[in-house]
Amino acid sequence: MAKRSTNKQPSLTERESQVLKLLVDGYANEEVGQILNLSRRTVEAHRARIMLKLNMHDLPALVKYAIKSSLTTADEHRSDPRLPD
């Protein structure tokens, strides 16, 4: 009897990857929606589905996943306009 691999990482859709990248780069749900031409509620649904698929429960875990998966880097993030250059 063949054994199933339990280490298989669930795959995200292209849209879920786009949403995740923007979220971990510091954009709020509403801003992600504006960028991707989605409603805030659709972004929230994508975020919930991403967290469920990856079995993660908070944004820091998603950030760590995104860095390990090369969706973003620790240096890639939204600039805070309140901070000086």
Image (tube, rainbow, N blue to C red):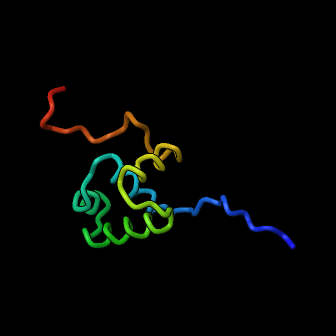
Q: How many marks?
A: 0
Q: Compare residues 2 and 42 and report the one nearer the observer.
A: 2
Going 26% across and 61% down the picture, which residue do you hit? 29
Left or right of 52? Residue 80 is left
State whether residue 35 is above or below residue 85. Answer: below
Quadrant location of the N terminus in the rendered image = bottom right
Question: From what the image shows, is residue 39 above or below residue 65?
Answer: below
Quarter of the image with the C terminus is top left
- Name, please, the residue furthest toward the right: 1
Residue at 49%, 64% in the rendered image: 55
Q: Residue furthest left?
A: 82
In this picture, residue 57 sits left or right of residue 10: left
Which residue corresponds to the image point at 29% horizontal and 68% vertical from the top-left?
A: 38
**Place of residue 46 in the rendered image (x, y in percent of width and height, measured from the top left):** 38, 68
- In the rendered image, residue 51, in percent from the top left (x then y), is placed at 43, 64
Residue 3, x across and y down, in percent: 80, 67
Q: Residue at x 40, y 61 (%)?
A: 57
Residue 81, percent from left and from top = 15, 38
Q: Nearer the viewer, residue 20 or 34?
A: 20
